[in-house]
Each structure stands twice: as structure tokens, then as C-alpha cells.
Image (cartoon, coloured by chain):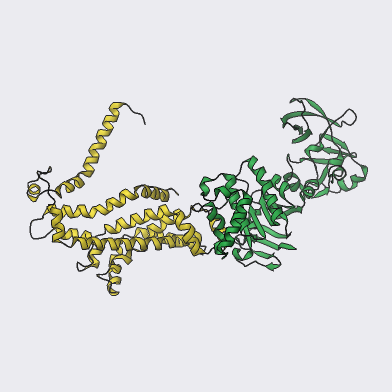
Amino acid sequence: MTMPLHQKVIFYLLLSISAILIFAPAIIAFLMSFMPSQDILTGKIIPTSLTLDNYVQVFDRSPLFNYLINSFVVSVVIMLGQLVLASLAAYAFVFLNFKGRDALFFIFIATMMVPFEASIIPNFQTIRDMGWIDSYTGLSIPFFAMAFGTFLLRQNFKQIPKELKEASEIAGIGDFRFYLTVVLPVAKTSLVTLGVYGFLTSWNMYLWPLLATTNDSVRTVQIGLRQLQSQEQLNEWGVIMAGAIIVVLPTLILLFLGQNKLQKGLAEGALK
Amino acid sequence: MKQVELMDVSKAYEKQQYVLDEINLSIEEGEFFVLVGPSGSGKSTLLRMIAGLEDITDGTLKINDKVVNHLPPKDRNLSMVFQNYALYPHLTVEQNILFGLNAKKVNKKEQQKRLKETAEMMGLRNYLKRKPKQLSGGQRQRVALARSVVSESPLCLMDEPLSNLDAKLRAHMRIEIRRLQKRLGLTMVYVTHDQVEAMTMGDRIMVLDNGKIQQVGEPITLYNEPANLFVASFIGSPKMNMGNAAIIDQKLVIEGVLKIPVDPADVATLTKNNGLTVGIRAEHIFQGTSENTTHELEVINVEQLGNETLLTFEIGKELWTAKWLGQWRVDVGDKVPVHISTKNISFFDTESGQLMKPASIINEQEVVAI
């Protein structure tokens, strides 16, 4: 794009200002995590001295490392569960012919309109009755079935020419082998997208782990963060921010790694 | 031996209109059989029914004298080549070719042997490690063919395999497929909408229109003695010149313009019906010499093809084309002498479209046996 210089200057100025505004909380949190508490309490933004105390403290004071592992396990399990179930469901919706398939699909999609909060009570009763409270199963299984993932993958699978399926049928390759050896490799991009999306969503989950856990052994990191804020005494913001930065790190790493694929995959799902 | 036999096979979607209506057909072993027809005629549906990809609504389908109506495709012992080649995009050429063999439990040694032979035969030896995306259209076509050859099924079905290729490559692949079929003794069922492909490749051709068989026969028979108006206009390029005609005063009057004397013996048969349509091939409108010129016609378009010249005339409201060998310096608007004889004219019943009397002279002159 060509534009006159003055226009360009204004353009970039506005962009920079909005970028700073949007990033300000994150930047402040980042800076605060390195500041001694006096600096924070006096309301300084530019630290007078840098310290790693906050990071040491956050691991000392709470089982943050445990929480991280819990979060990681739960997120990975949810991600894998979603990938397997969503891709199998999407396969059925695309490649298997049965009566009422499309009607069923629309009902399936309609469940996207029910917010998770609305189903949280029945879900809670279910896992309580099954004795899954305070367990990884209780934290992860309610999220396995995912209408959005099925939808995304169905749209992607639909782009696979049906001749591929027919050629496989003639060659004597069954549905399951076709799913494993053709559909999954061809739809790799979308699977990665969905995987990253599922991982991040579960990593950031707060309400459900709060309900489904009663002790520290299986709590996830988002709850751990909340625990850093104390009710009675003065908050040590530096420590909290250090914890937040640590929690955000995996998200950022994943985003940087998967950015290209994520964009491509989401756009593919949107187009057709 | 009959490789494929269809008896009263019909196909209807949702119990409504029949897209294929009582097809009776048998295809011999080792035959190159072409199904040809305009789009929507049901030819692909028929092929897919033979393959087992579509249900058969009515009738019996036999392969190797065995009723296969309800057998899944993999148990019919056939291979198929699709219009878009249906290559697996994430596999290399080699994996693509061998893909089906693993499912058939062919052992690795045998697989490699067949792969080597086939790759050699199709000229794919240097491309085995490539992905389909890195191949040209013709090469992809060859991979699809190789995949079908390597399965060693006696029956091969092809659904418009050449329509994605450019004209030059298509002509080349026509010959390759034909040679391959002869060499391996395959029974081939080949679907195309291109009548040139049908004529040049088929041992026998079936012309299909609107779900009904129009004619089955050898290419030359279809060309010389088309069973009805549809076949007449569909087979041959440029298409057969047609016109409404009537017999008035012992003369054939075409489109109220051309008058041609008729053999009195034929008059009786030709006046039986109400409507008469005549057809004459472009190469049978000869240039008139001083003795035999029957008409002088005004040229409205000239196409120079180098080895032959196509002249277009206006006959009533029809456009007729004459094909003359060699190069003729004719300008639009010129009046040229032509020779048209009833011996070259095929007669059809306008109402039913059925052939009443084929052109009689063809049999004497043009089919030269060597």
C-alpha cells in the first residue's frame, strides 16, 4: 500500500498508542513482577530496582508448581479427548450416511447456544454422584464433547473430495482405516488449531475447577493465582504478578508456535 | 465370456423419476466399452452402480456370472479411475500406488514387484517419491492409472478420466490407455461425454440419453447407421446436418429449399409417416463438378483447418456444414456448386426420431477393409 508520508506518520502513531493502551496491563504486570513491594505500594510504574524475589516467593508460598502440573495434565487430557471425540463425530457427520444425519447435526450445533454456566449444576451433580470430585477425571471429562470442535472439523472434512472415500471403498479400506490414514493426516492443520484452542481454553478455565476441587492436590493454576490474593492482610502484588506471568507463559509459547496454523485453520473453518 | 451383465437395471432417487430406466447390457471380457452421453444422461450413475458406489433400485447386476447387487465395492474385484484422480494428497506417488494393496494383504515383496513393473510401464519411475501436488495433470493421471493397474483387477472402470487434461495430452493419453487395456487384457468400462473419445477408444459404444439406451454398437455402425436422431446428432464432428423434409412430386424437399430427386422405389416407405427428417454427414456434401452439380449454395462461413475446409450454408433455418478435403479458397458470400445425393442421406421419423433408412452408399464406398 502506498500512502503519503504524513498520513503514514499519523497512522503509525495511532496504532502505537492503541497498542500501548492494550498492552499496558500486561506490561505493568510484567514490570511489577520484578519490583520490590515498596515500589509497588508507592505507585511507581518505572521500577527503581529490579529483583527476582517475587518469583522465588511465589514458589515458596504456594504449591504453584503442583498447580502448573495439574493444569497441564487436565488441559492435555481435555485437548486429546476433544480431538478424538470431535474428529470421530465429524467423520460420522461427513462420511457416513444415515437417516436424519443433518437434523442430528443441527441439534448438535444448537447446543453451542447453551452456555456452559447453564449446564454447570447438572454437570456438578453428575461428577459428584460418580465420585469424581477432586480428580482429574471430574475436571476433564465434562469438556470432552465439544460442538464447536465437531463443527470446525466437519467443515474441514467436507473439503476432502468424496472420491477419496470412494477410491478407498473400492480398494477395500474400511471406515476406521480411512479415518486414520487419510482423513486425519489431510486435516492436520485443523486438528492442530482445535488442539491449541482446546488447550488454551482449558488452561484458562476457572469456574469449573473451583467447583470440582476441594483440596490443593488437583487444583489448577488459575485457582492457585486466586489463592495468592489474601483476604485478611495486604496483597503482595509483586508476588501475584509473578505468578500471573508464569501462568501466562505456556499460553504465549503455544500461541507463538501455533499462530500460523491457528489463523489458517480458523479461517478455513470460516470460509466454507 | 460375459464380464458384466446388466438386466433391467433401473435407478431412481427417492422413488421419483427414473434416472436410469431398464438398462440391458452385457460387456464381454477384454472389451473396451464406452458409455457416452450428454451430462445428466445417467452414464456416471450407471458406472457407479457397477462399482457398487450407488444402490441399484431395480434389476440384476452380474459380474463374472455372479449376482453382485448387494456386494460392497471391495468384493467386486474391480478398480476405478476418477475424473479428479482421487489421489491422496498427503502420500507420495509410491504410497498412493500401493495404498490399496495393503488392505488386500498383498505381501511386501509382491507389492514391490508390482510397483516396479507398473512404474516402469507408466513412466513414473522418477516420480515415486513425489507428492501429487508436485506432478502435472498428465502425471497425476498416470498415477491414478497405475493405482488401478497395480490392483490387477480384471475389470477397470473409468469416469471421464481425461476431461481435466488439455487437448494435446488428452489425445496422447487416449492412445496410452487404449494400449494399456489391450496389453493387460483388461475389461474396461469407460464413461465420457466426448464423442470423439468414445469413437476413438471404444470397441463398442453405448449412447445414453435421459436414462435410456439410445444405441449400442461399434463406433462405425453408430456413425453410419445411427438408430435415431439423437445418436445421429451426437456422434460425429462436425455434427450431422439435419433438416425437415417432405416428398413432393417424387422429389425430396428439405426445409422447403433443397429439392433432390428420389428413387421412386423409396417413396412408398418414406411417405408412410407424417414427419420426415433427413440427415447428411458434412463429408457427403461434395463439391459439384460441371456434370453432377445439384445445387448452388451461398457460403456464410468458412473455416480453414489446413487439411480440410469447413463451409457453412444456410438451408432454410438450419445451418449445414460441408467438409471438403484440402484447402479451398472460398469467400463468405460466394455461391459454390455442391453435389448432394439421396444415397448419402439418412431418413428419420420426425415424431419418434427413429431411423427409417440409413444412407445407402456408405457401405459400398467408405469402409475399406485392409
Residue B178 appears at what percent x and percent y?
Answer: 70, 50
Q: Colour of chain A?
A: yellow
Residue at 24% x, 33% y: name it: A13
Is B312 located above or below residue A179 in the figure?
above
Closer to the camera in the image, B235 or A169: A169
Residue at 93% x, 43% y: name it: B264
Q: Is residue B179 visible?
A: yes
Residue B244 sits in which quadrant? top right
Residue at 44% x, 62% y: name it: A88
Along the horizontal axis of the image, is B206 left or right of A66?
right
Closer to the camera in the image, B154 or B5: B154
Is B162 located above or below residue A2 in the figure?
below
Residue B276 appears at what percent x and percent y?
Answer: 81, 44
How many numbered markers are drawn?
0
Residue B71 appears at what percent x and percent y?
Answer: 62, 67
Residue B364 appears at what percent x and percent y?
Answer: 88, 44
Along the horizontal axis of the image, is A132 left or right of B218?
left
Q: Which chain is green?
A: B
